[in-house]
Amino acid sequence: MDVAVVDPALFAGTAPPRLAGSRCPGCATVTFPRRGSCPRCPSGTMAAHTLPERGVVWSWTVQEFEPKPPYRRLGEAFVPYAVGYVDLGVVIVESRLDVPRERLRIGLPVRLTMIPAFLGEDGTEVHTFAFSADEDGEIW
């Protein structure tokens, strides 16, 4: 990983950012985050599966209350932020939405990005994944 991230297991890569899911070889179920076994069938071990970087907002809300550490950025005033479900075509992912509130809508095309989440104990900025408005608007 070329940037500090909240959990390296969530990512297939960070430049550009890609999420790491898993896919069942038996029934083709895709999960995020990765799972060791299929939640739908007894096929066995799931295979690594890199998720698409584009999708659409399936539903959203605004996080109005301050999260607990480490996700609270100490020393900074809390600013409410959008969270939602993003439909990637193969799976729906819960995520931060890096989109101005006035632009948020169900069906909005979005693209995977990285945003700062908190400062690590050593002062390093730790990033997480989020989705921002996709100016190209191309889905799947």
Image (cartoon, helix red, strand yellow):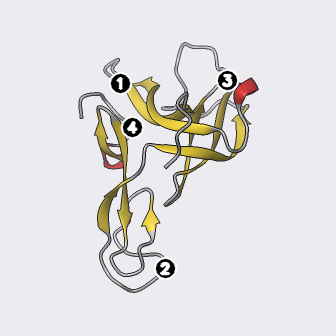
In front of the other: 117 or 106: 106
Q: Residues within 10 Å of mark 1 (few under 14, many from 20)?
A: few
Residue under label 1, please give it: 121
Q: Secondary structure at mark 3?
A: loop
Q: How much space separates mark 4 and mark 3, taking CA atoms?
A: 23 Å
Sequence-earlier tag: 1 or 4: 4
Q: Secondary structure at mark 4?
A: loop
Q: Give, as a three-letter code, the residue at label 3.
A: Pro
Residue 86: x, y in percent? 58, 47
Q: Mark 4 is on which residue type? A: Val
Q: Amino acid at mark 2?
A: Arg
Residue 126 sits in which quadrant?
top left
Label 4 vs label 3, nearer the camera: 3
Residue with the mark numbered 2: 40
Instruction: Give neighbour class at mark 2: few <14, some 14-19, many 20+ (Cα, 10 Å).
Output: few
Q: Are marks 1 and 4 in contact (CB under 8 Å)?
A: no
| Residue 100, label in figure | 3
In percent of width and height, residue 41 lies at 44, 84
In the picture, measured across the screen, residue 16 lies left or right of residue 89, that is left
Dot 4 or dot 2: first in sequence order is: 4
Q: Which residue is mark 4?
A: 6
Q: Which one is closest to the eye, mark 4 or mark 2?
A: 2
Against 46, residue 129 (above or below) is above
Mark 1 or mark 2, earlier in chain: 2
